[in-house]
Image (spheres, rainbow, N blue to C red):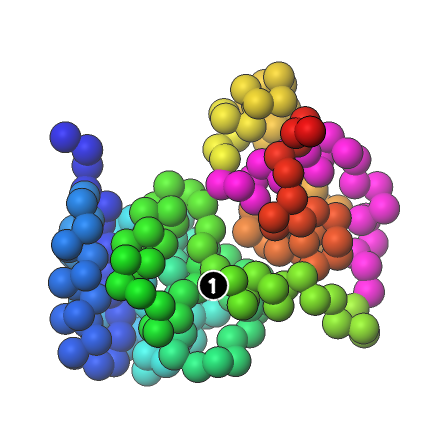
Amino acid sequence: MHDRIRVLIADEHPLMRVGLRATLEDGAHVEVVGEAANADQAYDLSRDRAPAVLLMSLSVPGPPVVQIAPRLRSSSPAVRVLALADAEAVDVRALVAAGVAGCMRKTEAPVRAVEAVRMIARGMTWFHQSMVSSLTRRPASDDRCAGVDSVTERELDVLRLVAQGQTSARIGTELGISERTVRFHLENLFDRLGVHNRTGAVATATRLGLISMDGPAPGAD
């Protein structure tokens, strides 16, 4: 039997938490290990109960998600944050920069929550399509990262597979290189793009037009 995906829910509305719990626990291999009504409680419970995914509303009282996510990355790096938005305007770049692994809207179908949690738990990202589109629109005032012109085609091959949610081991197999070499390429990318994690690298490279979220896999015809 597969291990269950441990999820912690943080939302200010009790009915929303009840609904999310029912939805997630209806999905196979998902276990809700706790509920929080504010951000500080979500942080404390995440450290105490070690969920794989913290599903946290952007409107929850207390410190915002963009502050909680970096704190968890330092204290409990195994916990990945999936934000839940109920407003149209979402600062996706700020979420990505903070290390948030994904963001979905409360208006999405319940099955999407289960899918998102599963993907986030496997190390992938999940952003609503409208949010992904906003990442690809580069503001006119944006400057290119200082090291972007030195990014190699092999590094972009690695990043395209990262964007598909592939692990370093799978990327190495796909490209015929060692896992250590994959990590070397990723470290170079982080430095050249001025980011600190895979999510930030994918978002920045997409925004700068280096890769496409819906483009073909490396080596595809």
Image location (x, y in percent) of residue 165? 49, 41
Q: Residue at x 17, y 70 (%)?
A: 19
Q: How many marks?
A: 1
Please tell me whether residue 25 belongs to the stretch shown in magenta. no
Q: Assess disc 1: are there few (<14), some (14-19) or many (≥20) residues with their C-alpha within 10 Å of its C-alpha.
A: some
Image location (x, y in percent) of residue 12? 25, 80
Decide: is 89 above or below 160.
below
Image location (x, y in percent) of residue 15? 16, 78
Q: Is residue 196 left or right of residue 209?
A: left
Dominant SS type (magenta):
helix
Decide: is 25 above or below 135.
above
Please tell me whether residue 153 belongs to the stretch shown in magenta. yes
Describe the element under mark 1 as helix, strand or loop. Answer: loop
> Is any part of residue 217 visible from this angle?
yes
In what quadrant of the picture does the N terminus appear? top left
Instruction: Place residue 112 in its image quadrant.
Output: bottom left
Instruction: Place residue 87 in its image quadrant.
Output: bottom left
Q: Which residue has dot 1 on it?
A: 128
Q: Residue at x 57, y 23 (%)?
A: 174
Q: Is residue 211 left or right of residue 54?
A: right
Q: Nearer the viewer, residue 212 or 31?
A: 212
Q: Which residues are magenta?
A: 143-165
In what quadrant of the picture does the C terminus appear? top right
